[in-house]
Image (cartoon, coloured by chain):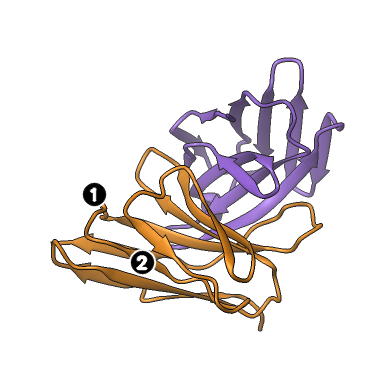
Amino acid sequence: GEDVEQSLFLSVREGDSSVINCTYTDSSSTYLYWYKQEPGAGLQLLTYIFSNMDMKQDQRLTVLLNKKDKHLSLRIADTQTGDSAIYFCAGGDTDKLIFGTGTRLQVFP
Amino acid sequence: DGGITQSPKYLFRKEGQNVTLSCEQNLNHDAMYWYRQDPGQGLRLIYYSQIVNDFQKGDIAEGYSVSREKKESFPLTVTSAQKNPTAFYLCASSRQGSTGELFFGEGSRLTVL
């Protein structure tokens, strides 16, 4: 089955860029997703990328997909304290998404 | 506003007791899901349902049960057979034929005393 891996922690200074990385095993995913979870809350979809795309940009967010290496990344430009949260990548069938372990992003002044 | 409502937000249970977590959605979504979240382990799928009166086991269904009698509702029962039930439980729904986006509730935190 699908396995999705992420590093657990990332700490960045306010105003810098953050890059959160994810590797996955199942290359048959039609879409790959990034979700954000704020403390004590559910997850919200940040963005997604279709599997035949290499890059998607949405305001401060840039998603890069390297299908050969099965690597997905999320870049947040001009990171703000409000971006502090846990970020999950997810892939797999739409009926059964597999989530990564989540990366806790901490933004310090 | 449309969304998913989970209740209760916090729940305490003694060992050996069953407990039921509520999940209601007014998004008219066909599919609903229950995930369990533990620190450092991401989300793991417990059960999912794509249509009323039908549901499938996820990766960690043992010790849990669900029902789907109405489209809007997908309650999860944590039974006394679940060996380590203390966790954060998330309910989600999705629309068939969409990009697969899941809409999540705010979660229920269950603590076994």
Bin the neighbour count of mark 1 within 10 Å (Cα to Cα): few under 14, some 14-19, many 20 and up.
few
Task: Return the chain for callout 2.
Answer: B
Q: Is residue B32 visible?
A: yes
Q: CA distance from mark 2 to mark 1?
A: 14 Å
Q: Quadrant of residue A93?
A: top right
Do tag 2 and tag 1 residues touch (Cβ < 8 Å)?
A: no
Q: Residue at left 70%, top 55%?
A: B101
Q: Residue furthest top?
A: A68
Q: Which chain is purple?
A: A
In the picture, the disc for residue B77 is 2
Give the SS element for disc 2: strand
Q: Nearer the viewer, residue A57 or A66?
A: A66
The residue that label 1 is drawn on is: B84
Q: Nearer the viewer, residue B66 or B94?
A: B66
Look at the image and give the colour of chain B: orange
Q: Amino acid at mark 2?
A: Thr
Q: Amino acid at mark 1?
A: Asn
Q: Residue at left 38%, top 38%?
A: B40
Q: Residue at left 62%, top 75%?
A: B3
Residue B34 vertical placement versus A18 (above, below): below
* Labels 2, 1: front one: 2
